[in-house]
Image (cartoon, rainbow, N blue to C red):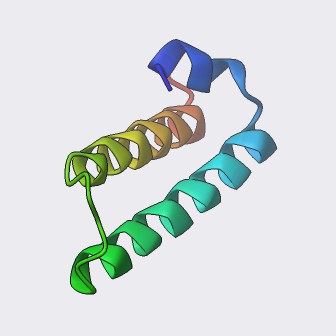
Amino acid sequence: MKASEIRALNSEELLTKLEEAHEEFFNLRFRLATRQLVNHCEIPKVKKKIARMETILRERELGIK
């Protein structure tokens, strides 16, 4: 998801997407530990997606744009 797509979501939708991303990250780490993960590039992508969502949530808390 791009930042503009994330900003288009309301806060409740954003929180549910963030929760889903955390679950996805957990599952990726679990598959990595059990050597079932084929594409290792997914982990940094999900981490960046989580960081974008948390940044936008924080911007909304502070009232920035």
Count of number-bearing discs: 0
Q: Which of 27 and 18 is in front in this view?
A: 27
Relative height, residue 42 to residue 23 (above, below): above
Kindly tell me whether residue 11 is visible in this rendering.
Answer: yes
Quadrant in the rendering for residue 37: bottom left
Would residue 41 appear left or right of 58 to someone viewing this image? left
Quadrant in the rendering for residue 60: top right
Quadrant in the rendering for residue 55: top left
Identity of the residue drawn at 57% across and 28% down? 63
Residue located farthest toward the bottom when viewing the structure as drawn: 34
Relative height, residue 24 to residue 51 (above, below): below
Kindly tell me whether residue 65 is visible in this rendering.
Answer: no
Q: Picture coordinates of residue 1 (x, y %)?
A: 50, 26
Q: Nearer the viewer, residue 23 or 34?
A: 34
Q: Picture coordinates of residue 13 (x, y %)?
A: 77, 41
Q: Picture coordinates of residue 11 (x, y %)?
A: 73, 40
Would residue 37 appear left or right of 22 to someone viewing this image? left
Identity of the residue drawn at 41% across and 64% down? 25
Identity of the residue drawn at 53% across and 13% down? 4
Identity of the residue drawn at 58% across and 52% down? 18
Relative height, residue 64 to residue 17 (above, below): above
Q: Which of 13 and 23 is in front in this view?
A: 23
Q: Picture coordinates of residue 24 (x, y %)?
A: 50, 62
